[in-house]
Amino acid sequence: MVPHLITALAGPINELEQRILDSMPAIERWFRLEWMEHTPPFYASVDIRNAGFKLAPVDTNLFPAGWNHLTDDMLPLAVQATMAAIEKICPEARNLLIVPENHSRGTSYLANIAQLVRIFNMAGLHVRVGSIDPDVKKATTIALPHGEQVVLEPALRTRHRLGLKYFDPCTILLNNDLSAGAPGILEELYEQYLLPPLHAGWSVRRKSRHFQCYEEVAKRFGKMLGIDPWLINPLFARVPGVDFQADAGLEGLRGAVDATLTRVRRKYKEYGINEKPFVLVKADNGTSGMGIMTVRDVRELDNLSRKARTAMTQLKDGLAVHDVIVQEGVLTQERVHEAVAEPVVYTVDRYVVGGFYRVHAERGTDENLNAPGANFVPLAFEHSTRLPQPGARPGASAPNRFYMYGVIARLATVAASYELEATDPEAEVYD
C-alpha cells in the first residue's frame, strides 16, 4: 500500500509513529471504507512536517508538478496506480491530452511534463501535450537538459471537445492549477473526462475549506486510533478581508494570530514540549509557496516591512490576496546533508507512489521551505530484502518509517475528496 522508502530520520521511533505502525491493519481497513464512499483526487502531492511529537500536512496540491523528482525506481508504482485510476474512470481510454501551465518554459517544469508523458505512455495511452496558452500558435519542440524533449502544441476547441489537430483524446489531464480562473476553452467539455475537475482549481479552491475538511478527517481517524487529533492536525483560523498594503483587516489578523499561538502554547504545555510556538500566515487561495510568512509573536505584525507586505499582496498569475489563513506552524525534524528538509508525498488515486525531500539550506526549522533556493532530493527505496514484520524483535526487521508519511498524505487526500464533493457545482442535492 505504501512503498518502503528511506527517510532521513534515524533516531528512535516515537510514540505516535509506533502507534501508527502498530495499527496498520486497522488503518488500512479505515481507508478502504473511506474510498468505498468517496472518490480520491486523481493525483496529488502533500507537503508534510514531522516535529517528532507531531506529524501533519501543511499543504495539499491537486495539480502537482515535480514528477521529475521521482526516481526511476518509483515509476512502476506510478504506472500501476495510473492504470488502476484510468481503468476506473475510462476503461476504453486510448488518447490522453496533458494541459500544462501557461507561460511555463522552465526546464524543470517541462521535465515534470515529460515525466507525466512517460508515466501515461507506460500505462498504455497515446499522450500529447496541448497548451491553452494563446502565445503557443504552432507545435514547438523544447529540448531538455538530459536529452529529452517536450512538444507543446496549441489546443483546439470544437463544440464540446478539446484536442489537437488530428488528435482526439477521451481524457484531459490538467497540470495547470487555474490560478487565473477557468478559461472558456476548458468549460462545458461534456464529452470528455477532465482530471482534476475545474472546481479543483485555485479560482474556486480555498485552503481554509481543505483544512476544515482535514480537521474532520483527523478527528474521526484520531478517535479510531485512540490519539489526540492535534497530533496529526495543524490548528488554523481563517481571516477574511485582509489587505496588507492598505492595512485593512490587520486587526482581525492580529486577533487570529494571538488566539492560535495561545491554543498552541496550551497544547505544548499539555505535552511538555519546550519549543517556541509559531504560525504561518498564508493566502487562502495561494499556491507555489507564494503569499506565506512566519510569525512567532503577534507584535511582528506591527512592523511589517514594505517587502513583506508586497510579498503577501500578490500571488501567481497576478491573483490578489483578500483572505488568509493563520496555520499552526509545525517544526521539522528532518535533515538532508545538515540542511532543513520536509517530505513531499505523491499520490495517484488512492495509492502512494513515492516522494522526495524539499531541502532548503538557508531556512530554519520553523520556516516555509517552498521558496527560491530550495532543492529536491529523491527519497530512496529501502534496500533491505526483508519485509517489515509487525511484532518482530527490535533490529530483526527495519520499520517502514515512510509508512506514517503515506498515512498522513492519504488522510489529506481523503480531506481533498470531501472538499471536492462540497464544491462540485454539479453535485446532486438530496433534501
Image: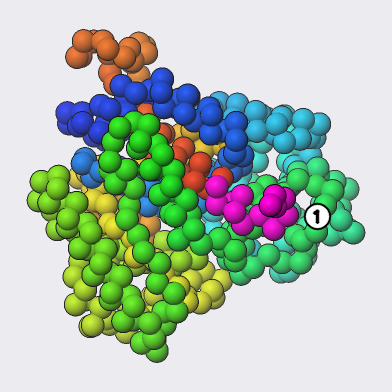
For the point 41% across and 27% down, the residue is: 27
Q: Which residues are magenta?
A: 418-431
In the image, what residue type sits under mark 1? Leu
Answer above or below: position of 196 versus 209.
above
Nearer-the-camera pick, 189 or 360: 189
In this rendering, the answer to whether 66 lies above or below 153 is above
Q: Residue furthest bottom?
A: 246
- Taking the view exactly as shown, the residue that stands out farthest to the front is 431
Q: Residue 383 at x, y = what percent?
A: 35, 19
Left or right of 203 on screen, residue 47: left
Judging depth in this view, the residue of 97 and 319 nearest the camera is: 319
- Seen at 23% across and 59% down, the residue is 263
Number of disc labels: 1
At mark 1, the secondary structure is loop
Measured as percent of width and height from the top left, residue 193 is found at: 76, 45
Question: Which image quarter: residue 152?
Answer: bottom right
Reading the image, the residue beneath label 1 is: 189
Residue 362 appears in the figure: no
Q: Residue at x 42, y 82 (%)?
A: 243
Q: Is residue 51 visible?
A: yes
Provide residue 403's location: percent of width, then percent of height: 37, 29
Frontmost residue, 214 versus 377 = 214
Q: Judge whether 259 appears above or below 52 on screen.
A: below
